[in-house]
Amino acid sequence: MDSFQVGPIELSSPSASSLSRDDYCSSSSGSLRSIAIDMINYSSPQGSKSFNKLKHVLDLHSEFFVDLKPFDLFQRNQESMATLLEGYGLKRLYESPAEGRSNVLLVETQFSSSTCPLKRDDCATRGRILIQTEQIGFGYGESKIFKQLMKSCNESPSCIVFEYSDYNYERAVAEPYTWGNSYVLMPVMTQDPSRLNQFLPETRKEIKKRSIDVVLFGHMTVRREFIFQKSKAYTTYHPEKKHLIKMEYDTHEMAKAYSDAKVCLIVHAHAEVTPGEYHRLSEIAAFGCILVVENFADKIGIDRYENCGGLIFADFDHIFETAVQVVEEIDDDLNSYKSTRRHSDWWNAGVKWETILPEVFNIEVPSLGRDE
């Protein structure tokens, strides 16, 4: 790990109260929703420039259009963003507004085919929320196109960025970027509910009776190939063990594997120091496998992800061995792994997106923007 550290962050935790862990995790202060509130309060406390700019952007128009395509992975996130804005009282448009119609708030990623691209001079002041999905300083997040887009949003009076990672945020507000006036932390990569929920089995298989010991799905980068080779060597000497490590595009097959896995493994694609892979965590958690996750650099909510969401963290050099150890403990019938339902229930309780903005701005919204 490098020496980068996030600034001081106040976190809720079971030790701060007299609640048991189960009571804490089922309370409002221990919920997934509380992480969303903590994120916003950290980046955009009341009266800050980003807080005021967000309020300005939200109040520009009464209608919005959200388009997070072209990636299928973001479809659930698209619905979450719609629920967030409907909770503020805005009305969703389901058809893309005509190019000349400027009184609609646009909600996009940097990859969306916008009807009014930010790079166009005549679109620079258009009301817009950019959903930031990349790791700043790596890959596309280091490209000139990305930097110019974020710079343009920061300079526009009517553009705000929703950032999913406090690690990214700390980089965005520092030199050489200094985009903090337009950055609002928001758990936009959390799928709520997961795109795989349609495949959830009616009855969840007991953890010890599952037939797949370890599953890892993802693009087979050099780091994941290394884990695959470790797994291959291990299963050669332990042929009774079943590991499934590969790229899988079929969502039904993914869901079947997760629902029959003891351990679901998450390994970063390219870098050791990286934001959390919340799109994967929130996609897998409902299936009840034990989540063994490579350490990530975000700080906000780590106590709740670990204590309530059931994450077991490990560094890259030891993550495969950690997964093997967890499987052994499951097979040895240790009490700590007999039931994973409380972890799944915590994830399934969700962010409650429609409640977030009214709490942040301390307002009451008489009715949602949905059609009755």
Image (tube, rainbow, N blue to C red):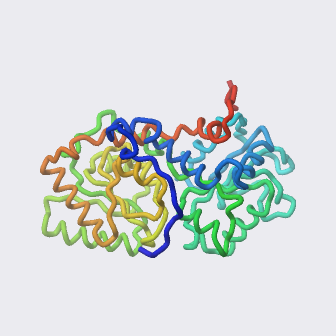
In front here: 192 or 174? 174
Name the image quarter holding residue 64. top right
Q: x, y (%) of residue 99?
A: 83, 51
| Residue 285, x across and y down, in percent | 38, 47
**Image coords of residue 366 (percent x, y):** 69, 26
**Image-based side of 197 in relation to 204, left or right:** right
Q: Residue at x 40, y 36 (%)?
A: 26
Measuring 50% from the left and 49% from the top, which residue is drawn there?
190
Task: Work out whether 87 lies above or below 256.
Answer: above
- Front-lying residue, 369 or 297: 297
Measuring 37% from the left and 44% from the top, which residue is drawn there? Answer: 14
Q: Could you tell me how many numbered marks the image carries?
A: 0
Report whether residue 371 is seen. Answer: no
Does residue 313 lie above or below 63 as drawn? below
The picture quadrant where one finds residue 217 is: bottom left
Q: Is residue 103 visible?
A: yes
Position of 8 relative to 351 (above/below): below
* The C terminus, quarter of image: top right
Quadrant of the snapshot with the N terminus? bottom left
| Left or right of 309 on screen, residue 111 | right
x and y percent of residue 342 in the render? 33, 39
Placement of 204 over or under 265, stated as above or below: above
Towards the viewer: 342 or 110: 342
User: What residue is rendered at 67% in x and 56% in y?
Assistant: 161
* Left or right relative to 159: residue 214: left
* Relative side of 331 to 194, left or right: left
Residue situated furthest top in the rendering: 372
Quadrant assignment, res 118: bottom right
